[in-house]
Amino acid sequence: MTRALFFDVFGTLVDWRGSIAREARRLGLNVDGEAFADAWRNEYQPAMQAVRSGGRGYVKLDVLHRENLDRILPRFGLQAMSESDRAALNLVWHRLDAWPDVVAGLATLRERYLLAPMSNGNIALMADMARHNGFQWDAVLGAEIARDYKPKPEVYLAGCNAFDLAPEACMMVAAHSSDLAAAAACGLKTAHIARPDEFGPGGAGEKGPDVPVDYAALDLLHLAELLSA
């Protein structure tokens, strides 16, 4: 029986692309907000891979995000941005806006299950994002607990261990098939959430899973219906 649901966050629960683009416009940055968001996010996997491969020790995602920001600013003619402005902009990741179904969906799911983010985001980032959006978690799990980054098995298994649950009593919920495949390989159940607009309309967001999953849902409210059936 499933006791706990673990959630990917970036893309699955929150609209990182739209949120960063809006922040760029709010700050008056003379850039294409969506292109800026994409460029920043494109540095995400390479930065984490340096940790996953053992090329550097674990550092929090906030640190990687800041290094990535410094890397892309010259591409947009923003290399003169001050240190204080860079530090403030980096915190946009702490206040990304949720997709419309998420708050109600999590509240419904929490009536029956333990809930926790299983994110590459660090604890402070996840806590701030929860307060920004009204997420209610039973714990904050993921990369900082495991001192490594998904899709390393240690991340998923550390979450199960934190709740004193066997992997088969836990379910990974994500909008990314690769994340679900990695969790399934560790023995977790899996649920895919469709987020076709994660990378913008007509972008590469997944409309459905491309790996076997236990559930495929249109959104979190749909997932709650599937799990209660």
Image (cartoon, rainbow, N blue to C red):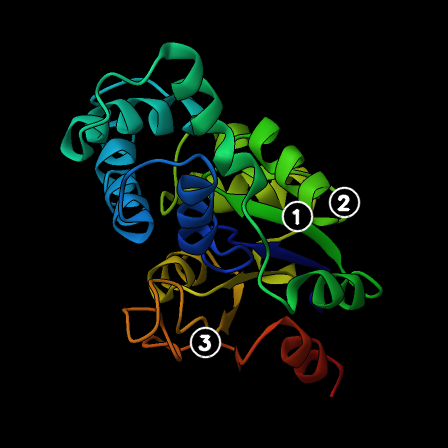
Q: Residue at x 68, y 76 (%)?
A: 221
Evaluate if marks 2 and 3 touch, with contact meaning CB atoms under 8 Å apart.
no
Say whether marks 2 and 1 touch (CB < 8 Å): yes
The residue pinned by badge 2 equals 138
Query: In the structure shown, which secondary structural element does the residue marked by tag 3 occupy?
Result: loop
**Label 1 SS:** strand
In this rendering, position of residue 35 left or right of residue 167 = left
Q: Residue furthest top?
A: 83
Q: Which mark is residue 213?
A: 3
Bin the neighbour count of mark 1 within 10 Å (Cα to Cα): few under 14, some 14-19, many 20 and up: many
Q: Nearer the viewer, mark 2 or mark 3?
A: 2
Which residue does the image show at 40% across and 31% down from the upper left?
A: 148
Question: Considering only order in the chain, which callout, 1 or 2, is on the residue closer to the N terminus?
Answer: 1
Residue wearing tag 1: 116
Q: Is residue 20 visible?
A: yes
Furthest toward the bottom, the residue is 229
Amino acid type of the residue tagged 1 in the rendering: Ala
